[in-house]
Amino acid sequence: MPRFFIEECLDHNTDKIVLEKDDAHHISHVLRMKIGDEVIVCDGAKTEFIAIVEHFESGRVFLAVKQKRINNTEPPWRGWLFQGLPKGDKFELIIQKAVELGCYAVVPVACSRSVAKLSPVKAERKLERWNKIAQEAARQCGRGIVPKVYEPIAFSEAVGRISEMSLGFLPWENENSCSLRNLLESESSKITQDGLEIGFLIGPEGGFSQHEVSLAESAGIRSVTLGPRILRTETAGLAVLSMLGYQYEQ
C-alpha cells in the first residue's frame, strides 16, 4: 500500500486528510490511483492512518480515514549517524541504507581527511536531494518517521552534539581493546529505554586523524573496534546500525 508522510501530528480523532503538491501529483499522475483506493499516511509521530481516496481537486487529494494504528517499525532508541563526508555519490547510498536499518538522523561531518568539500551553495542543493532520498527510503521500508539529513558540520561540533547523548562512540581501526559488542552490552540498560539517543562517528575514506580521536575521547566518546577487518566508510555505519538492530530489536 502506498505510504505518504506529513509534517503535522494529527489528532487521533481525525477522519479527513488532504494531501497536496508532490504527494497529490504522485497519487494522481504517477500511481494513477482512483476513488476508493487505499493509502497509508504517517504523521511523523509513529501513527499511521489507513485512508481511502474520496475525491480529487486541482493539486489536492482528499482522503477519508478508515483506520488508525501505531507504527511498530521504529526502534526504541534514536540512532544518530555522524558520517565523515565521503567522495562521489557514496553518501546517497549511505543515507538510503541507514534509513532502512532504522537510523533516526544522518549528519554529514567535515573531517580533516575528508576529500569531499561542499560550498554553502552546493551543500544546500545536496541537502534537498539527500532528504528526498531519506523520504523515499522511509516510504519503501515502512518507517513511521522520515529520518532527517542535516547540513554538514565540523568535526568539533559533531563531538559536542554526541557528548550530550545517552551513548556516544567512534569506530576506529586502531582500537583493539574495546569492541562495539562489549560496549553495547555494558550500556544495555540505557539503550533499551525508549527515546534515548545513540550517536556515533564514522570516518571518511582516510579515516580519523589521531587528533580527532583524542578530541572525541576527551569528550567521553569511546573508540571501539568493529572486528579484525577494516571496513570502507560506506560499510562501517551500516554495520553499526545492523549491530544495534541485532542487539536491541526483536
Image (tube, grey):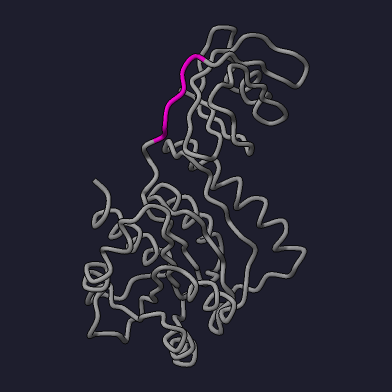
- The residue nearer to you, when weighing 35 against 77, is 77
The image quarter containing residue 103 is bottom left
The image quarter containing residue 197 is bottom left
**What is the number of callouts on the image?**
0
The relative height of residue 27 versus residue 87 in the rendered view (above or below) is above
- The residue nearer to you, when weighing 171 against 233, is 171
Judge from the rendering whether residue 219 lies leftward or rightward of residue 33; answer left or right.
left
Taking the spot 66% from the left edge, 25% from the top edge, the residue there is 19
Taking the spot 68% from the left edge, 70% from the top edge, the residue there is 118
Quadrant (top left/top right/bottom left/bottom right) for the C terminus:
top left
Residue 92 in picture, x, y percent from top left: 53, 55
Judge from the rendering whether residue 233 lies leftward or rightward of residue 20; answer left or right.
left
Residue 114 in picture, x, y percent from top left: 55, 78
Taking the spot 41% from the left edge, 34% from the top edge, the residue there is 71
In magenta, the rendered stretch is: 66-71
Taking the spot 30% from the left edge, 53% from the top edge, the residue there is 245
Judge from the rendering whether residue 156 lies leftward or rightward of residue 56; answer left or right.
left
The relative height of residue 25 versus residue 176 in the rendered view (above or below) is above
Residue 70 lies within the magenta run:
yes
The relative height of residue 200 versus residue 104 in the rendered view (above or below) is below
Quadrant (top left/top right/bottom left/bottom right) for the N terminus:
top left
Q: Main secondary structure of the magenta part?
A: strand
Residue 218 in picture, x, y percent from top left: 45, 89
The relative height of residue 40 versus residue 177 in the rendered view (above or below) is above
Residue 1 lies within the magenta run:
no
- The residue nearer to you, when weighing 154 against 17, is 17
Residue 170 in picture, x, y percent from top left: 39, 76
- The residue nearer to you, when weighing 166 against 223, is 166
Judge from the rendering whether residue 223 lies leftward or rightward of residue 178; answer left or right.
right
